[in-house]
Image: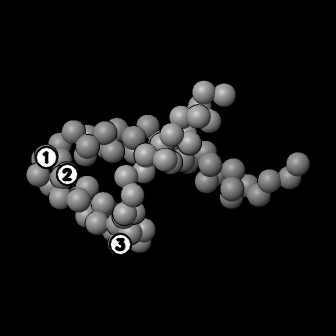
């Protein structure tokens, strides 16, 4: 199988830097103050509700359906 050398180099670079990127992400998660994290989370929830409005039902029927599938 012939793979473009540029793609192979791209993958190799990602493998090389991925531990550093993961460490940066972990440090950012640990160092973010709770009020800022909560504000970011609230923004994500508001966006999700805007895109998919909340249901008028409790969701109990859907939950029971999922539990029934898991029992099988």
Q: Position of residue 64 (x, y in %)?
A: 51, 40
Rendering quarter of residue 25 = top left
33 to the left or right of 51 = left
Asked if the residues shown at circle 1 and circle 2 are in contact, with their CB atoms under 8 angstroms apart, the answer is yes
From the image, state whether disc 3 or disc 2 is nearer to you.
3
Question: 35 or 69, which lies in front?
Answer: 69
Asked whether the viewer can see residue 17, the reply is no
Secondary element type, mark 1: helix
User: What residue lies at 11% left-to-right and 52% top-to-bottom?
Assistant: 35
Rendering quarter of residue 65 = top right
Distance from disc 3 to disc 2, alpha carbons, whole Å, reads: 20 Å
Q: How is the image coloured?
A: one colour
Q: Position of residue 26 (x, y in %)?
A: 31, 39
Q: Position of residue 60 (x, y in %)?
A: 43, 46
Q: Of marks 3 and 2, which one's residue comes earlier in the chain?
A: 2
33 to the left or right of 25 = left
Residue bearing the label numbered 3: 50
Residue bearing the label numbered 2: 37
Residue bearing the label numbered 1: 34
Distance from disc 3 to disc 1, alpha carbons, whole Å, reads: 24 Å
Q: Of marks 3 and 1, which one's residue comes earlier in the chain?
A: 1
**Disc assigned to residue 19:** none
User: What residue lies at 62% left-to-right and 48% top-to-bottom?
Assistant: 11
């Amino acid at each position: 199988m012939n793979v473009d050398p540029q793609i192979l180099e791209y993958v190799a670079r990602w493998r090389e830097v991925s531990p550093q990127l993961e460490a940066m992400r972990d440090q950012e998660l640990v160092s973010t103050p709770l009020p800022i994290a909560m504000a970011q989370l609230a923004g994500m929830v508001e966006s999700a509700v805007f895109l998919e409005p909340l249901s008028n039902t409790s969701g109990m029927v859907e939950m029971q359906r999922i539990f029934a599938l898991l029992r099988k």
